Amino acid sequence: MIELRQCTNKEQWDEYQLDNGAHPLQLWSWGQVKAGHGWQAVRLFAYSEDAIVAAAQILIRPLPSPFKSFAYIPRAVFPEAYKDDLLHLLSTHVKQEYRAIALSIEPDALAFEKPEGWVRSTNTILSAETVLLDITKQESDLLADMAKKTRQYIRKSSAAVTIRQAKTKEDIDACLTIYVETARRAGFNLHSKQYYEDVYLHMRDHSPIFMAFEGDTLVAFLWLAISEKTAYELYGGVNNRGQELRANYALKWHAIKKVKEWGLKRYDFGGLVAGGVSTFKQHWSADVTVFAGTFDKPLSPLYTLWSHTLPFAKKTLQKIRRKK
């Protein structure tokens, strides 16, 4: 038997998560970011007797009546020995406390056997497909797994740019200027500027930003979220000159080597989407990794209406999905 207890202590939460290989989207600071932009972060420990055996940071999104709210757990680990009981308790909690229409989970796992009453969802938030590098490998092995052109572009661009980490608000502003240009060119939507500033403010050492310069001019950036084990790409951008220099190749390879040096185990490219960005990412590995996917526990008779029918629900899900 297990029981849930809410955690209100940041240090206790992060200590457990980091000690147990949690994904960076399960760190306290990621919940802080989301809490400033339309969500509520709820952090629950699962106890067996007096020992913590699991943890889940749940993000609660208010919805218009009659739907009340939507509950979402990104990239949590659900230990097999406690999985079914844990998911039952979590879904019961969000139904009782927040009247959630559903609990949606995207496990940090490649395989997941859903408990009874759960359904596979077509409304994904994080992409299940990604490039996931095992950075415990030797650098020579990582290079060997890449496309030949990728190795060539790394060498050429590394000679053309210098790379350093962002340290100031002015650095963040410069990166966001490039990000706006990148979004316009690629056709994706952005959060508010304050959102990105909050990521930098709250996550700090758990969110390094690498910047590529030609001389004194910024031409590309790459923004990560990191935990003890995992590096996860949040945002990245390159201007026209950076594209000419292939600066994003040198930049990504520098980031991979740096987090490997820091002792992390895996590097996640942050999902694959259609278009040139996806093609660029796939050239870094011989294989595409597919996570287990998205699973929902319907908690209301209105779930089907919410998830499949109403236009405003689809728009809400698109907003929730918009991580980039």
Image: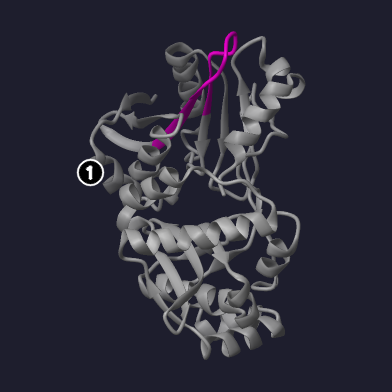
Q: Does 167 appear in magenta?
A: no
The correct choice, above or below, for 235 with respect to 156 in the image is above
Q: Position of residue 122 (x, y in %)?
A: 73, 34
Examine the rendering and report whether any part of residue 112 can be seen: yes
Examine the rendering and report whether any part of residue 114 can be seen: no
The kind of residue on which mark 1 rests is: Glu
Residue depicted at x 45% and y 50%: 23
**Most prominent secondary structure in the magenta stretch?**
strand
Q: Position of residue 223 (x, y in %)?
A: 46, 61
Viewer-side residue, 51 vs 235: 235
Task: Give the position of the N terminus as an image quadrant.
Answer: top left
Q: Does 64 appear in magenta?
A: yes
- 10 Å crowding of disc 1: few (<14), some (14-19), many (20+): few
Q: Position of residue 73 (x, y in %)?
A: 50, 35
Q: Position of residue 274 (x, y in %)?
A: 75, 55
* Residue 54 as seen in the image, left or right of residue 116: left
Q: Which residue is mark 1?
A: 11
Residue depicted at x 69% and y 73%: 283
* Residue 170 as seen in the image, left or right of residue 242: left
- What stretch of residues is rendered in magenta? 55-71
Viewer-side residue, 288 vs 310: 310
